Image (cartoon, helix red, strand yellow):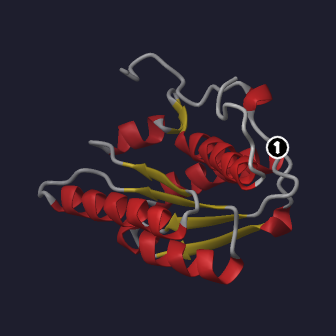
Amino acid sequence: MASASKNLSAYDEKSIPSAEEMSFGIIVSEWNADITHALYDGCYDTLVKHGAKPDAIHTVQVPGAFELPSAAKMVAAYHNPDAVICIGCVIKGETKHDEYINNAVATGLANLGMALGKPIIYGVLTPNDEEQAKDRAGGKHGNKGVEAAVTALRMAGLRKELSKGSKRPLGFN
């Protein structure tokens, strides 16, 4: 789906489960802090909007995106949240450094989620330039932090429903 003319952060608020009884970990990369902090604000505000209690949101900062998987594992072990959201921004440079970092982070987070059986959410921007990053951190294409929070809410809700032994189709609106 092309994002050229869309606010990708629009969602059906009625389809989101309540976060009143949920807890979350948010890991934020300090690299490209102006972008990642805007993503964090969108993420945090969305969780609270849907009922998450501020003291049930555990936030830590790490130096860069590469550190997101190990910090996510630590937060998952220490706080046992219903979902962990990882926020970062790796802007393409003159070398292939971004490709190596992005691949390592995506693979690490996917493997961690499968190993833990817990939602580990990839909220990492991989833009070609700073303008694209800004467009996705509260700019014309919305805020990917909001999208990461919505994904965490839906996946944590799905996990809770499955733990109850639900027999109805899950995830359909």
Please state the horizontal and vertical placement of residue 109, each as a whole percent of the image.
Answer: 42, 63
Please state the horizontal and vertical placement of residue 121, each as a whole percent of the image.
Answer: 53, 54
Please identify the quadrant where the N terminus is shown: top left
Q: Nearer the viewer, residue 65 or 1?
A: 1
Note whether 56 is above or below 173 in the view shown: below
Q: Residues within 10 Å of mark 1 (few under 14, many from 20)?
A: few
Q: Residue at x 74, y 49 (%)?
A: 165
Looking at the image, residue 133 sits to the left or right of residue 50; the answer is left
Q: Please identify the residue farthest to the left as the structure is shown.
A: 95
Note whether 9 is above or below 53 in the view shown: above
**Residue 95 in which image quadrant:** bottom left
Residue named by callout 1? 49
- Three-letter amino acid code of the residue under disc 1: Lys
Please identify the quadrant where the C terminus is shown: top right
Residue 146 visible in the displayed image: yes
Please state the horizontal and vertical placement of residue 125, each as a whole percent of the image.
Answer: 41, 48
Q: Residue at x 83, y 63 (%)?
A: 54
Please state the horizontal and vertical placement of residue 112, each as a whole percent of the image.
Answer: 45, 68
Residue 42 visible in the displayed image: no
Mark 1, secondary structure of its residue: helix
Q: Nearer the viewer, residue 40 or 134?
A: 40
Looking at the image, residue 138 sits to the left or right of residue 53; the answer is left
Q: Residue at x 43, y 52 (%)?
A: 124
